[in-house]
Image: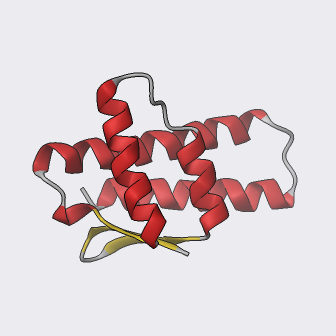
Amino acid sequence: MMAVEFSADHEWWVQNRVFAKIMAVMPDSSEQERTVKHRIAQGASIGYLDVRQLPDDLRTDVRSALVNAVSRLIEALEQTTRDAEAEDVLQHFRVLRAIAVAGS
């Protein structure tokens, strides 16, 4: 399990395989993107990332990277054939995005 805390009332608890999908769609072409992805990967290695404890600029970038990655996954799922399982996964990602946005 991976826990990500955005605020006292907004957190993610996601399976490692789901978090790996989120990480997989994060860009890392610029130095800043690599820094953000590295910081998130550090949290993933211990199963916990407290976004609140990051410096202000990094906190904003990490939250944005997570929201953008989940948004990419949502867009990709919306383009595929829908069945009940895909709808459940899509709804799960929508909830994750809403939590991250609300926790900012």
Q: Position of residue 79 (x, y in %)?
A: 75, 33
Q: Is residue 36 left or right of residue 18?
A: left
Res 22 visible? yes
The residue positioned 20% from the left and 64% from the top of the image is: 52
The answer to which quarter of the image holds residue 32 is top left
Q: Quadrant of the C terminus?
A: bottom left
The residue positioned 75% from the left and 56% from the top of the image is: 87
Q: How many marks?
A: 0
Res 12 visible? no
Q: Position of residue 21 (x, y in %)?
A: 63, 50
The answer to which quarter of the image holds residue 1 is bottom right
The residue positioned 53% from the left and 47% from the top of the image is: 23
Task: Classify 1 as above or below 51.
Answer: below
Q: Position of residue 89 (x, y in %)?
A: 70, 58
In the image, 67 versus 20, the foreground residue is: 20
Task: Classify 10 as above or below 76.
Answer: below
In the image, 58 versus 78, the foreground residue is: 58
Task: Classify 62 as above or below 16.
Answer: above
The residue positioned 12% from the left and 49% from the top of the image is: 56
In the image, 45 versus 100, the foreground residue is: 45
Task: Name the outermost residue toward the left.
Answer: 56
Q: Position of residue 25 (x, y in %)?
A: 57, 38
